[in-house]
Image: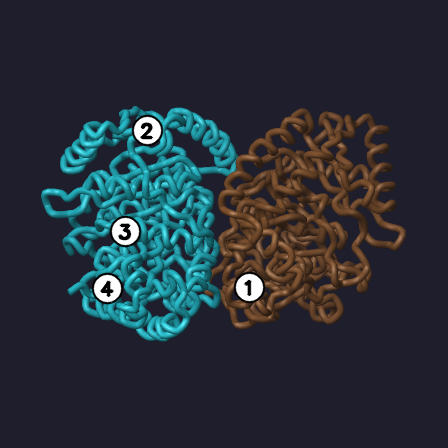
Chain colours: A cyan, B brown
C-alpha cells in the first residue's frame, strides 16, 4: 500500500477531495517519514513536529481546493517563528518575526510549513551535512541541498529553493526530482537572503510537474492550467550541448543524445545550435555581477563574522566581488543588455532549449556540491528553466535533462515538460 | 558658539582631525539635541542613548579618516539589536539579528547608528507622528519622514531614507535638507523592507553635499572626489516643468523661474523641454509596477495583519496591485523598456535636468505627506537625483530644487549640485 508521504501533492489532494485521505494523515505521514529518515539524510536545519498537525486539523475543517500542502523551505528564506540560520553557525537564535512574502502567500493558501531545509553557507558553495538520498556518499548538490533531498526522499512533496547560478536545477537533477526556476521576478523574494538581487530567483522542487503548477499558481495567486493536449511536433527545440560538452560525463551525453534521437524519430523539430562563445561570455559576466552584488549583500557577515566564514566563500564569490568597482558594475550591465539581445536573437525561432542539467550524476563526496556551469546562462538571462529526472546513470544515480524557454513562457515550458516526461522518459 | 550637533559631518570630522572636537563630544551633543527636541519633532521610532557613546569612545582611539559619523536610519532598514517596526503597531518586538547590508558597511567604516527614524506605514503613505521642524503644523513629507526631520533639526548630520516614488526627495525638500537618490542599484538594499524591488532605492539626507559624498563613498566602498573646479557653463541643462506645472504653487514656480533666469544670465546653457506626455505615462507605468510588486512584497502584512492596515494602504498601492495579473506585469516591463528609451533619447544631449522637487512647500497638517508626482519618472527610470534647499516660501518654509542626471553620472550630478548651491542660492 502506498503511504501518504509517498504521494505527490496532486494525488494526495485528490484523495483528500474524495475523502480517502485526511490532511492530518498526510502531514503525520510526512512527519513520520522525516523522523525516520532525517538522521540519515540530514535535509533539515529545523523541523516543526507540532504546529503542522494543528494546521492540518484546521485544513480538515476548511476543505478548500488545493489547501493543506506540506512544504519545506530553504533556510535562507524567513518563516516566522523558525530560525533562519543560512547554513552558518552564528545565526542559531535568528528567529524572524515576519514571513518571507512567498511563505506568507503559501500559508494564506493553506500550505503547511514543515521546516527549514539545509542550505550551503549563505547560499554560496560551502556544503551542509545533507546527503543524496540515492547514495549517501554522494552530494545532493547545492545550494538548495536540503530542499532537493527532502523532496527526493519523500519527506515533503514540495520545497522552496533559490537559484543565483544553478542552485535549484543542479540539486534537483542530482536528487532525481523536478526542479523549476521561473522567469526572473515571477515569485516574490522579500524575506529571502539576497545573494545577487539582480539574478536571485525563488524556485521549486517537487516530484511531479502538476505539483509545480499548483505551487506556482499559489505563489502568483492565479489559476493557470497546462495545455494537456499539446502536440510536441508543433514546437521548435534547440539542442544546446554547451561549451562544457567535453566536460560532461558519458552517461549524461549518451542518454541525452538518445533522447534527442527519439525526439527526431518522432518527427519533433530539434536543431543543435552552437552558443558556445556566448555561454562562455555569460559565465564571465555572471561571475562579475554576482560577485559584486554578493559582496555587498552579505556585508553583515563580511564585516561581523569574517573569521567564521569558509575559505571557499572568502576566496570565491566574495573575492570576485572585491575585484570590481562600481564603474565596472555599471559597464557590465550595459554589456549584459547587448549580450542578452545576442542570445535572444539566436534563440528567437525556438520555443524550447534542451541542455544537460549538470555535467553528470551527483559527485561522490559531500565537500563539493558540483558545477553550475550548465545553468549560469539561463539564470543570468532570467529565463525559466526546468530539470526533469529523465535518465539513470550506470551507478544508479538520477540524471536530469534541462529545458529552458523564453521569458514569461513558463506555462508553455511546464506544458512541454509534462508532455515530454509522459512520452519520452 | 556653534554646538557640535549643528555641524555637518564634514566640518565635525575636520575639527576632530585637528583635535578641536572629540568623537564623544560630537555624539553626546547629537544625543543631547535629540533628548531636547524629540518630544516636539517625533523623528525617531527608537533611540539608542548608550551604545553610540561606547562606539564614539572607540572612535577616539581608532582615529581613522571619516570615522565616527553619527547617523540615523529609516525604520524599514534593519539594524541589529534595534526594533524594525516599519511604521506599524504590530512589529514592536521585531528586533533583527542581522544588519542591513548598507548598515553593516556604514558601521564597518566607523559610522555610529543613533536610532531608527519614523517611516510612514510600511513605506507607503499613512503618516507617522513626525512634524516639520520649520513649522510643527506642517508635514515633514514621507515616507522617509523622520530621516528628513532629524537631519533638518540638527539631531544627526546624516540619515538613510528610501525612495520608491518620491520618498527621499520630497521629505528632504519639505524639511530643507539635501536629499539624494543614487542611480538604481548603487547602494545595497539587503535587509531593507521591499516595497517595489525593481524601483526601491536607498537614499541619503544630509545638510551638505560634501556629507552626501562622504557617506556615498562609504556605502560604495570607494574614494571618489567631486570636481571642485567644475565650470557650470560646460554643461547642458534641461528645464522640465512637468505636466504638473499648473498644480505647482506660485512660490515654487517664481523661485524656480528666477533661478533659471539667473543661470541663463550667467550664460549657462538651459533649455526648457517638454516631456509632459512621457511623464504622465511614467506615472501610469509606475503605479502598476509598484502596485503589483508592493502587493507581493508585503504579503506577510496583507495576509496576517490586513485588518490592522490603514485604509490608504489597502485602497492605495495594494488595491492598484490587486488589479494586475502576472501577464500584465510582464507586458509592462516590455513597455517600460521602450518608455525608458524614449525619455533617454529626449535627454541624450543634456547633462542635467532641473525640475521642482515637489509641488510646493510642505503642506499644512500631518495627515497627508504630499505628492510625489515630480519624482516618479526619475525613480522609475532609476536615474540619480538630488534636491537642494535653494528657496524659501512666503510662509518661511523651505522649497527644494531637483536635479537629475543620467544613469551612473552620480559624481557629476553631485559636483554640479555643489557648484550650483555655491553660486546660485
Q: Which mark is residue A236?
A: 2
- Which dot, 1 or 3, sits closer to the camera? 3
Q: Which mark is residue A208?
A: 3
Tell me the quadrant of the picture where the N terminus of chain B can be found: bottom right
Q: Are there few (<14), some (14-19), or many (20+) residues within 10 Å of tag 4?
A: many
Q: Residue furthest left?
A: A394
Q: Secondary structure at mark 4?
A: helix
Q: Are there few (<14), some (14-19), or many (20+) residues within 10 Å of tag 3?
A: many
Rounded to the nearest angstrom, the CA distance separating label 3 from label 2 is 24 Å
Nearer the N terminus, badge 2 or badge 4? 4
Chain containing mark 2? A
Q: Secondary structure at mark 1?
A: helix
Rounded to the nearest angstrom, the CA distance separating label 3 from label 4 is 14 Å
Same chain, labels 1 and 4:
no
Q: Secondary structure at mark 2?
A: strand
The reply to whether callout 3 and callout 4 are in contact (CB within 8 Å) is no
**Residue at point 66%, 46% (across, down):** B180
Rounded to the nearest angstrom, the CA distance separating label 1 from label 3 is 55 Å
Chain containing mark 4? A
Chain containing mark 1? B
Give the residue pinned by disc 4.
A5
Say whether residue A328 is visible. Answer: yes
Q: Secondary structure at mark 3?
A: loop
Q: Position of residue B278 (x, y in %)?
A: 68, 34
Q: Position of residue B46 (x, y in %)?
A: 61, 68
Q: Residue A244's image quarter?
A: top left
Tell me the quadrant of the picture where the C terminus of chain B can be found: top right
Amino acid at each position: 500500500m502506498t503511504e501518504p508521504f509517498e504521494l505527490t501533492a496532486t494525488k494526495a489532494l485528490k484523495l483528500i477531495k474524495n475523502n480517502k485521505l485526511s490532511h492530518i494523515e498526510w502531514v503525520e505521514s510526512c512527519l513520520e517519514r522525516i523522523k525516520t529518515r532525517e538522521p540519515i539524510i540530514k535535509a533539515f536545519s529545523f523541523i516543526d513536529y507540532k504546529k503542522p498537525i494543528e494546521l492540518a486539523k484546521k485544513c480538515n475543517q476548511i476543505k478548500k481546493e488545493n489547501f493543506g500542502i506540506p512544504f519545506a523551505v530553504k533556510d535562507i528564506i524567513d518563516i516566522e517563528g523558525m530560525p533562519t540560520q543560512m547554513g552558518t553557525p552564528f545565526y542559531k537564535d535568528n528567529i524572524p518575526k515576519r514571513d518571507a512574502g512567498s511563505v506568507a502567500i503559501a500559508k494564506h493558501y493553506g500550505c503547511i510549513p514543515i521546516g527549514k531545509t539545509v542550505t550551503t553557507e549563505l547560499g554560496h558553495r560551502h556544503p551542509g551535512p545533507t546527503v543524496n538520498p540515492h547514495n549517501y556518499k554522494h552530494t545532493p548538490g547545492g545550494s538548495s541541498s536540503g530542499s532537493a533531498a527532502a523532496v527526493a526522499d519523500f519527506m515533503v512533496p514540495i520545497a522552496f529553493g533559490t537559484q543565483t547560478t544553478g542552485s535549484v536545477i543542479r540539486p534537483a537533477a542530482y536528487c532525481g526530482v523536478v526542479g523549476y526556476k521561473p522567469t526572473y521576478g515571477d515569485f516574490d523574494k522579500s524575506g529571502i537572503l539576497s545573494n545577487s538581487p539582480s539574478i536571485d530567483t525563488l524556485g521549486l522542487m517537487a516530484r511531479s510537474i502538476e505539483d509545480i503548477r499548483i505551487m506556482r499558481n499559489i505563489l502568483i495567486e492565479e489559476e493557470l492550467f497546462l495545455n494537456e493536449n499539446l502536440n510536441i511536433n508543433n514546437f521548435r527545440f534547440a539542442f544546446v550541448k554547451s561549451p562544457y560538452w567535453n566536460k560532461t560525463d558519458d552517461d549524461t551525453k549518451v542518454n541525452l543524445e538518445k533522447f534527442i534521437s527519439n525526439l527526431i524519430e518522432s518527427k519533433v523539430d530539434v536543431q543543435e545550435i552552437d552558443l558556445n562563445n556566448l555561454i562562455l561570455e555569460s559565465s564571465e559576466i555572471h561571475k562579475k555581477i554576482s560577485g559584486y552584488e554578493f559582496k555587498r549583500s552579505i556585508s553583515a557577515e563580511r564585516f561581523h563574522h569574517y573569521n567564521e566564514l569558509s575559505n571557499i566563500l572568502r576566496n570565491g564569490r566574495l573575492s570576485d566581488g572585491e575585484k570590481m568597482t562600481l564603474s565596472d558594475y555599471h559597464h557590465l550591465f550595459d554589456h549584459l543588455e547587448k549580450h542578452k539581445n545576442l542570445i535572444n536573437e539566436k534563440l528567437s525561432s525556438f520555443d524550447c532549449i534542451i541542455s544537460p542539467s549538470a555535467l553528470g550524476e551527483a559527485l561522490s563526496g559531500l565537500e563539493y556540491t558540483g558545477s553550475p556551469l550548465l545553468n549560469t546562462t539561463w539564470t543570468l538571462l532570467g529565463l525559466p528553466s526546468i530539470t526533469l529526472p529523465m535518465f539513470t546513470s550506470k551507478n544508479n544515480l538520477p540524471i536530469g535533462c534541462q529545458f529552458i524557454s523564453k521569458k514569461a513562457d513558463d506555462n508553455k515550458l511546464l506544458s512541454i515538460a509534462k508532455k515530454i516526461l509522459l512520452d519520452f522518459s
